């Protein structure tokens, strides 16, 4: 088995996949803690659908680098969703459901109407569930991913205490002079970027798993914010790495394998929590 | 000048006034209780005092060393906090955030301050404990320590005893009294508990659509509205 892995890791694209997978898992798990605690889990889900719609538009327009289309649309929707979340007129969860399902439907419709691809179902399936895309990463994709991940980690480190304050008690944070709205916006923009990145790894339908599972698992085990963040990052990286290895060895779909590892980890952590009590 | 001076303030939402003709002042060392029915604009007033909301007309002036962000605020608990994984220390420290500008991490000054305030409120031994596992009374102490990290002058408390058991309620009132007397911290408390208000506060602001009363506690008890409100809400539990 090790021999087989050795052969695989001789190929640069396998090494790229591993590196990118781990970085994406790390960034999304950091954000996940904040999103889960703020009751924003669904925003991640909604945005991933939007990203699918945007990806469909990019495919139809046949742009060279689809990021140029997907990233702005997704970030724009993130800002929009956050606004409606605060405004009571259109209730937050309804707005999210509306936007996400709308984007999904329009995306699929566009692809059907305009796509020149011979294998439409395959295209859709790989955008939704991730696929070999992770193994066909170009050098520039990898660099983009590394840069974005470093950026996310830096933002998270620099604003760590403020993110904690805004997540725990927004009103108090505002009362002490913090611009809570700006931090919410920051979180939304970073979430959107991570989702667009993660689409390559696990596909748009499965991204939420990368965001919420590590956070939920970590919350079973740790009782301080710092502990939860650390554990979430470590668990997420472990699951992503083992998921990618397993998918190579067993030739299973990468995204789904990683998510299953996350689910197994969550079950394990819940069990440990129950035993501990 | 006074720490807070409210002049002809009108508060409301979307052009509709909730409270009007608000005129009152708060001086250092005062203990003001704001009472009134639900929906009488108490929470709107809190937002205005915290500068989270502008008055529709009139002026709220802060003075005497009190900046708008110099108010230590004790909000009502939210659902988010009920299962939030955070240690007591992390929460208390977050009270210092408002004052240290753009630095990303806490320095020694902030840590000392948090420690001092935890000691003052008798929660030092809980520092590493998880917030969600504490009793209601202990949780309020943690939030109070956090508020003290944000201010040296004034605490603004929104229904600080709601949901606490009677022993914890008494403890909370004693604690506030101590902070008010010994540390000369001004206290503004929004409360349903009119009897506690007339027992502990020295000033009362009774609001409805218009302020019905503002003055010292003694005058309030003698006033028509005070007597009516006190008798309607039952016997003098704290008197």
Image: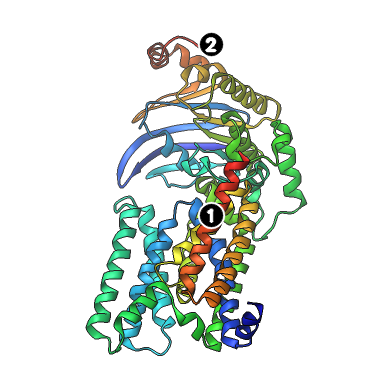
Q: Residue at x 30, y 46 (%)?
A: B15
> For residue B70, which numbered disc appears in the image?
none
Residue A203 seen from this side: yes
B139, above or below B50, in the image: above
A273, above or below A134, in the image: above
Q: Quadrant of residue A123?
A: bottom left
Instruction: Tell me the chain of label 1.
Output: A
Residue A244: where, in percent of width, then height?
55, 73
Residue B14: where, in percent of width, then height?
31, 47
Please give the residue where the numbered disc 1 appears in the rendered image.
A266
Residues marked 1 and 2 touching at CB (< 8 Å): no
**B16 left or right, relative to B100:** left
| Secondary structure of the residue carrying numbered label 1 | helix
Image quadrant holding the N terminus of chain A, namely bottom right
Residue A178: where, in percent of width, then height?
55, 53
Marker count (numbered) = 2
Q: Quadrant of residue A83?
A: bottom left
| Secondary structure of the residue carrying numbered label 2 | loop
**B32 left or right, relative to A101:** right
Image quadrant holding the C terminus of chain A, namely top right
Instruction: Tell me the chain of label 2.
Output: B
Q: Residue at x 59, y 77 (%)?
A: A18
Please state which of residues B85 and B117 is positioned toward the viewer in this rendering: B85
Please state which of residues A2 and B35 is positioned toward the viewer in this rendering: A2
Please state which of residues A201 and B62 is positioned toward the viewer in this rendering: A201
Please give the residue where the numbered disc 2 appears in the rendered image.
B239
How far is disc 1 from disc 2 in space, using C-alphas?
54 Å
């Amino acid at each position: 088995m090790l021999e087989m892995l050795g052969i695989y890791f001789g190929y640069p694209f396998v090494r790229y996949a591993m590196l990118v997978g781990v970085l994406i898992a790390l960034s999304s798990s950091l954000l996940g803690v904040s999103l889960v605690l703020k009751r924003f889990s669904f925003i991640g889900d909604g945005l991933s659908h939007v990203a699918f719609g945007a990806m469909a538009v990019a495919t139809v327009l046949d742009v060279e680098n689809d990021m140029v289309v997907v990233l702005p649309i997704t970030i724009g929707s993130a800002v929009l969703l956050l606004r409606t979340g605060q405004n009571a007129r259109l209730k937050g969860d309804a707005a999210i459901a509306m936007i996400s399902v709308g984007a999904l439907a329009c995306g699929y419709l566009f692809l059907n109407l305009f796509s020149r691809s011979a294998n439409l179902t395959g295209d859709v399936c790989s955008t939704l569930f991730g696929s070999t895309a992770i193994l066909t990463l170009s050098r520039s994709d990898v660099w983009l991913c590394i840069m974005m991940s470093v950026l996310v980690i830096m933002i998270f480190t620099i604003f760590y205490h403020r993110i904690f304050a805004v997540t725990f008690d927004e009103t108090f944070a505002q009362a002490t002079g913090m611009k809570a709205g700006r931090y919410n916006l920051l979180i939304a923009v970073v979430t959107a970027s991570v989702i667009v990145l993660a689409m390559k790894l696990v596909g748009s339908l499965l991204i939420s798993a990368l965001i919420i599972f590590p956070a939920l698992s970590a919350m079973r085990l740790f009782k301080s914010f710092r502990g939860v963040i650390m554990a979430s990052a470590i668990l997420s990286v472990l699951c992503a790495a083992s998921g990618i290895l397993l998918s190579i060895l067993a030739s299973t779909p990468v995204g789904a394998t990683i998510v299953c590892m996350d689910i197994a980890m969550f079950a394990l952590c819940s069990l440990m929590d129950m035993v501990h009590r | 000048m006074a720490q807070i001076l409210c002049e002809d303030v009108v508060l409301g939402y979307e052009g509709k006034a909730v409270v009007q003709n608000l005129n009152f002042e708060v001086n250092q060392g005062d203990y003001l209780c704001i009472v009134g029915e639900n929906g009488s604009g108490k929470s709107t007033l809190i937002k205005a005092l915290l500068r989270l909301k502008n008055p529709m007309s009139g002026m709220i002036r802060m003075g005497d060393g009190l900046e708008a962000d110099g108010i230590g605020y004790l909000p009502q608990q939210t659902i988010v906090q009920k299962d939030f994984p955070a240690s007591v220390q992390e929460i208390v420290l977050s009270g210092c955030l408002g004052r240290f500008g753009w630095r990303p991490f806490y320095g020694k000054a902030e840590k000392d301050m948090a420690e001092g305030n935890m000691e003052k409120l008798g929660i030092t031994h809980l520092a590493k404990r998880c917030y969600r596992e504490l009793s209601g009374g202990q949780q309020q102490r943690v939030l109070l320590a956090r508020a003290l990290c944000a201010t040296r002058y004034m605490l603004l408390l929104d229904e600080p005893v709601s949901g606490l058991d009677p022993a914890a309620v008494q403890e909370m009132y004693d604690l506030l009294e101590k902070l008010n007397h010994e540390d000369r911290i001004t206290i503004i408390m929004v409360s349903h508990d009119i009897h506690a208000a007339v027992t502990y506060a020295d000033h009362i602001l009774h609001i409805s659509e218009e302020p019905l009363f503002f003055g010292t506690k003694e005058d309030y008890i003698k006033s028509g509205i005070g007597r009516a409100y006190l008798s309607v809400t039952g016997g003098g539990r704290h008197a």
